[in-house]
Structure formats: C-alpha cells, structure tokens
Image (cartoon, grey):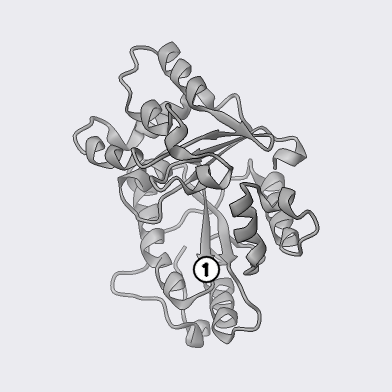
C-alpha cells in the first residue's frame, strides 16, 4: 500500500511487540510507545499529539506506533478506566486525517486490547492459518466481532479472511481452504492463500517486509492481490457478521459442504 503512494500507519497493539521487531526496532530501546499514548494523562488534544509524534517511528516508507511488553500492563489498568473500550479510538482520532490507512496488529487473544482495536476500527482483516485448530478458532472471533458491532461499534465490518501458511501439498490445508471458501464467502471476501515460505521468516530476521527483502518471491502475488483488492474497495462498507447460532459449531473441513456460517 505504501508503495502505491498510500500514507500508512501501523499500530503494534500486541504486548509481544512482534510487528515492532519485524520492522527492525528493538522494543526496549524505545522510550515512548503506544502504551504512553494510550495510558498517559493527556491534559489536552495538543499534549496527546505531542506524545504521539514522539512515539511514532518510520521504516520502509511507513510509520509505526511501536509496542513493547509494557503494553501488557494496559490491559490490567484499563479494567478500572471509564469508557475503556474507546480509549484507543480516542487516542487515534488526531491521526485519522494524516493517513490513508491505519492498520492495527492485534494480540492473538480476544481480551480487552483486541476489543479496543475492534472498537477503533471500521474493518477487520482476519488471518487464518489453513490448519484445523486455527479454522475452528474463528468461531469465537466472529462472535466477538458481532458483539462489538452490536454493542459498541455498529460501523465495524469484515473486510475479509486471509488464509495463511498454506501448503498445497498438505491435504488438511486444502480441506481447510475449501471450508473457508465455502463457509465464509457470505461473511467477507476470502482472499488468495498466502503460501508457507521460509522467506517470511528470513525477511523478519532481516527486519524487512518481504516486498523489500525479495522482490521476486512468488508469495508476493497473493499479497499484491490482497493490497489491490483493499485499495479498490476501502471506501466500501463491508458485510456485517452475526454469531453462529447457539450450540452450533463449525463442521470439520472433511464435511465442509454441510456447514454454514450465518451472516
């Protein structure tokens, strides 16, 4: 997206700081992070903007609001905060006109940090490994998205699902991919699968996006298609999602043609 001329801000909202590390930064070397912008006692909009500008760093023609393990404290501290689910949205508000895209990397757990990210967003991209356990785990996420949309953020939609770490030679991966395409198409776009490739780990070790690390890698075709789709439809309101009916579980990918996800 940045290479297409878009102004992109990445927000690392995972206490592990994986995105921060991936972009070549050492989390503990950063004196100001997303924790300070989220939990600081800002007396005015101007003071908030000042802290945001101190926290934001740049890499590969993108801006990053970094994180480290201090962010883990925020989840505990937010429990006693007023309007806690909306604090991230309020924090990001001064930045919305500066960027075409603000992409929030969420923690893997569906706790208060993830709910805050869903509250601050207008769309969700759901990466799902094409493994059975990851596929089954999407039920809880869909229920959480539906709850947030119903109770807090009615503008939230699903932009799509991204099958990841896909190996064409593995039969389970093929079954899970087919199940995703059959069951989730009414909920959001199921994008082309991102192949499982060691180049991703190598690029991460080098602190570079794959697009820069290896411009000719085959996996870039799927990533480019994903970016192109988002760039062409980002003003479109996506489809809302409702939770699965009570007691209904996803069927095994072996029986995917019998399973449905309600939209």
Q: Is residue 128 left or right of residue 100?
A: left
Determine which quarter of the picture holds residue 137: bottom left
Q: Residue furthest right?
A: 216
Q: Is residue 182 visible?
A: yes
Which sits in the foreground, 249 or 81?
A: 81
Determine which quarter of the picture holds residue 252: bottom left
* x and y, in percent, of residue 99 in the image: 61, 30
Number of numbered labels in the structure image: 1
Residue count near mark 1 (Cα–Cα under 10 Å), binned few <14, some 14–19, many ≥20? many
Residue depicted at x 61% and y 72%: 166
Residue depicted at x 23% and y 35%: 77
Which sits in the foreground, 147 or 58?
A: 58
Determine which quarter of the picture holds residue 202: bottom right
Q: Which residue is mark 1?
A: 129
* x and y, in percent, of residue 247 in the image: 29, 74
Q: Is residue 179 left or right of residue 243?
A: right
Q: Say above or below: 160 vs 105.
A: below
Which sits in the foreground, 41 or 175?
A: 41
Q: Is residue 228 visible?
A: no
Residue depicted at x 62% and y 45%: 236
* x and y, in percent, of residue 159 in the image: 57, 52
Quadrant where the N terminus sits is top right
Which sits in the foreground, 66 or 221?
A: 66
Q: Say above or below: 238 vs 82.
A: below
Residue depicted at x 32% and y 38%: 85
Q: Residue furthest left?
A: 80
Q: Say above or below: 200 vs 41.
A: below
Callout 1: SS: strand
Q: Say above or below: 89 vs 14.
A: above
* x and y, in percent, of residue 180 in the image: 54, 72
């Amino acid at each position: 997206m940045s290479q297409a001329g878009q102004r992109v801000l990445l927000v690392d909202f995972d206490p592990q700081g994986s995105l921060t590390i991936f972009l070549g930064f050492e989390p503990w070397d950063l004196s100001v992070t997303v924790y300070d912008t989220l939990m600081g006692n800002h007396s005015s909009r101007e003071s908030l903007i000042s802290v945001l500008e101190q926290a934001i760093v740049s890499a590969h023609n993108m801006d990053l609001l970094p994180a480290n393990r201090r962010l883990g404290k925020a989840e505990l501290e937010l429990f006693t905060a007023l309007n806690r689910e909306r604090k991230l949205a309020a924090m990001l508000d001064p930045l919305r006109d500066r960027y075409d895209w603000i992409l929030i990397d969420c923690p893997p757990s569906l706790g208060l940090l993830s709910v805050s990210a869903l509250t601050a967003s207008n769309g969700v991209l759901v990466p799902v490994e094409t493994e059975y356990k990851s596929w089954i785990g999407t039920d809880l996420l869909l229920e959480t998205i539906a709850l947030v949309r119903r109770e807090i953020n009615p503008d939230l939609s699903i932009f799509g699902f991204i099958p990841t770490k896909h190996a064409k030679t593995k039969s389970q991966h093929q079954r899970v991919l087919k199940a995703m395409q059959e069951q989730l198409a009414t909920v959001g776009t199921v994008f082309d699968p991102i192949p499982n490739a060691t180049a991703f780990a190598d690029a991460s070790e080098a602190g570079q996006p794959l697009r820069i690390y290896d411009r000719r890698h085959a996996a870039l075709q799927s990533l480019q298609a994903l970016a192109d789709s988002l760039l062409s439809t980002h003003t479109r309101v996506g489809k809302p999602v409702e939770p699965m009916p009570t007691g209904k579980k996803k069927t095994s990918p072996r029986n995917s043609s019998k399973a449905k996800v309600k939209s």
